[in-house]
Image: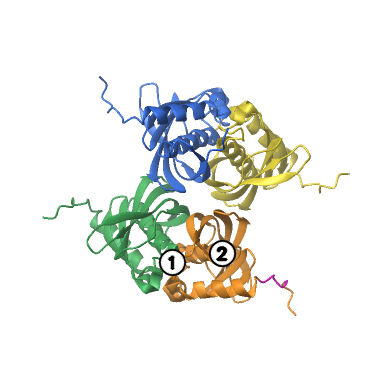
Chain colours: A green, B orange, C blue, D yellow
Amino acid sequence: MGERPQQEQASPEARKRIRESFDRQGLMAHLGARITHVGPGRVHIELPARPEVTQQHGYVHAGATSAIADSAGGYAALTLFPEESDVLTVEYKINLLAPAAGDHLEAIGIVLKPGRTLTVCQLEVYGVRGDGERKLVANGQQTLIRVDRPAK
Amino acid sequence: MGERPQQEQASPEARKRIRESFDRQGLMAHLGARITHVGPGRVHIELPARPEVTQQHGYVHAGATSAIADSAGGYAALTLFPEESDVLTVEYKINLLAPAAGDHLEAIGIVLKPGRTLTVCQLEVYGVRGDGERKLVANGQQTLIRVDRPAK
Amino acid sequence: MGERPQQEQASPEARKRIRESFDRQGLMAHLGARITHVGPGRVHIELPARPEVTQQHGYVHAGATSAIADSAGGYAALTLFPEESDVLTVEYKINLLAPAAGDHLEAIGIVLKPGRTLTVCQLEVYGVRGDGERKLVANGQQTLIRVDRPAK
Amino acid sequence: MGERPQQEQASPEARKRIRESFDRQGLMAHLGARITHVGPGRVHIELPARPEVTQQHGYVHAGATSAIADSAGGYAALTLFPEESDVLTVEYKINLLAPAAGDHLEAIGIVLKPGRTLTVCQLEVYGVRGDGERKLVANGQQTLIRVDRPAK
C-alpha cells in the first residue's frame, strides 16, 4: 500500500542464515543496529542515533557509520554465496560526505561485482530524519573474500 | 625502566584538549576505548577485546577496529592544529590484514603529511596478547580536514 | 537517431575551458586519450587499446585505466566550479574488477557530492568492444579539492 | 662506496623474471619508466619528468604517478611468489600529497603483508630533484591477488 517499491527478498534460507550471523555480531547489538532488508546482493542495516554512537559534536561517529556500512556490504555478498561459505572484509574505503545526523542511519550494501574468490560492494549510508527525509552521509567501496566456513 | 623507548608527549594544552574531545565521543566510551598516548602528530587508542565489540567469529569487528583507527588519526592531526581548530574525517581506507584477535587492540594514528586545510594520516592497528606479543591486524590511510571550531 | 539517450551538455564556456585544460595534459595526448562528453558534473574520456598502454598480459595497464578515470573525475568536478577555479586530486581508490579488454576503454567521472572546498566523484571505467558491448572493468571513488587558479 | 646503504637484492631468478615482465608492459616503456631496484618484497621504479607525462600545470599527472606506484607494488609482491605465479592488482588507494615535481619520480612498492592469496603493499612516490633532494609526493596502499600463470 505504501509508495515505496517492494524490494526483492533473498531466499528464506539466505535470510535465516544472515540473520543468525548478524545476531552473533556482538558489536551490532551493542551499537543498537538491526538488519532491515535482505535481498539478493543487497542488505540494509539501520542504526538509531543515540548518545552511545556519537563523536565529539553529537553526530554519529565515523566508526559507527563505517561499522554498519561494512556489515551491510559483507552480508550483501553473503546472500550470493552457497550455504557453507562465509565472508571476510579485505578492505574498504569510505568518504564521510556530510555530518551523520538524523533520527537514524540506514546503511545499504550492494554487490557491484560478485566473484568466486573476491566480491566488490558499493556502500551507502543515509541519515534519515523523523519525517522520512533522507540524505547521503557516506559513500564507500569494499572488497570481500569468500572463505569456507570452519566445521563446527 | 622498561625497554620500550619513552615516546615524546604533546604539550599539556594539546593533551588536555584532546582528552576532553575524546571524552565527548560517546562511541569511544561505549566501546570501552581509552586514549593511551598523545604525542605530537601521533595518538594511541586501546580497545579491550570484549563480546560487545565482536563480529560473528568472535574477533573484533572491522567496524570497531576502524572506529579506534579513525579516532587515533583524527586526534593525531588535532595535536598539530591551533587551539581553536577542530578536525573532521574526509575519508579513510583500511585493509584488514589478519583476524583482530588478542587481549586488546592498539590503534596508532600518525600524521604523514600535515597541511593547512588537509592532513593525511597513516593508521595502524595491532592485536596485543596478554603476554605482550603484537601483530599488525589492520593498516590504513586517512584524509582529514581542519575546521574552525564553532563558538560555544 | 541512435538508441542512446542524448546526454545533457555543460555550458559552452565550461566545455571550452575543460577541453583547453585537457589539451594541456601531456599525459592524455601521449596515451591517446580523448574527451568525448562534457556534461554538468559528468565527463567521459576514451582511451583506445594500443600496445603503448598495456600491462604484461596485453590488457590495458591499471595505471592507464586509473589515469583516464582520474582525469574524468577531475573534469566532472571542474564543470561545477566558477571559471577562475581549478581542481586537484586529493586521493582516489579504484578497484580493478576485470581485465581491461576491448577496442577501447571509456572512463566516466560523475560528481557524487559537490562542495565549496572538497568534491567527491564516482569513477567508472568500461571496456568497450568493437560491436559496442560494454563491461565494467574498474570502479572507484575520488576526492578533489578546489583551488584558485594562479594568475597568468 | 656511497653513503646510501646497499639494499638487499632479490634472487637472480626473481630479478630476471620481474625485469622480463616489466619489459612486456607497454605502458612502462611508453611512459619512459625503468625499474631500478628489485629486492625481496621491495621494488623501485623511476619515471623521468617529461612533457609526455604531465597534467595541465606541468607537474607529473596523478595517473602517471599512480601507474609507476601500482607497478612497483605489483612487482614487490611478485618477488615473494614462486616462479609459476603472477599477480594482479585488486585495488589501490593513493593520496597525492604534493605537486609531483622534480627531475624524476621514484616509486617504491613494499610488501606490508604477504599472503597465499592476497598481498598488501605500501606505495610511496618521491619527487627527486637534480641535486638529489627528495620529497614524498604520493602515498598509497594496494591489494594484490596471486594467480597461476597461464601455460604458454
Counting other residues with Cα less than 10 Å from the Cα at mark 2, is it few (<14), some (14-19), or many (20 or more)? many
Mark 1 falls on what kind of element?
A: loop
Image quadrant containing the N terminus of chain C: top left
Any mark on residue A48, and which? none
**In this orientation, which residue lies closer to the viewer: C101 or A124?**
A124
Image quadrant containing the C terminus of chain C: top right
Q: Where is residue B117 in the image (x, y as percent from the top left)?
A: 54, 53
**In this orientation, which residue lies closer to the viewer: B90 or A142?**
B90
Q: Is residue B6 magenta?
A: yes
Counting other residues with Cα less than 10 Å from the Cα at mark 1, is it few (<14), some (14-19), or many (20 or more)? few
Asked if marks 2 and 1 fall on the same chain, the answer is yes
Task: State which tag comes first along the sequence, 2 or 1.
Answer: 1
Give the Cα separation between the discs numbered 2 and 1: 35 Å
Residue reaching furthest bottom?
Answer: B1
Q: Which of marks 2 and 1 is in front?
A: 2
Asked whether disc 2 touches disc 1, contact meaning CB atoms under 8 Å apart, the reply is no
Span shown in magenta:
B5-9
**In this orientation, which residue lies closer to the viewer: D127 or C41?**
C41
Q: Quadrant of residue A101?
A: bottom left
Q: In this view, does C7 lie to the left or right of B10?
A: left
Q: Can residue C91 be seen in this view?
A: yes
Residue reaching furthest left?
Answer: A1
Q: Is residue B150 left or right of residue B138?
A: left
Q: Can residue B48 be seen in this view?
A: no
As shown in the figure, which amino acid type bears the numbered disc 2?
A: Leu
Q: Which residue is pictured at 23% across the width and 59% down the height?
A: A132
Q: Name the residue under label 1.
A: B57
Q: Which residue is pictured at 46% across the width and 29% down the height?
A: C17
Mark 2 falls on what kind of element?
A: helix
Any mark on residue B78, and which? 2
As shown in the figure, which amino acid type bears the numbered disc 1?
A: His
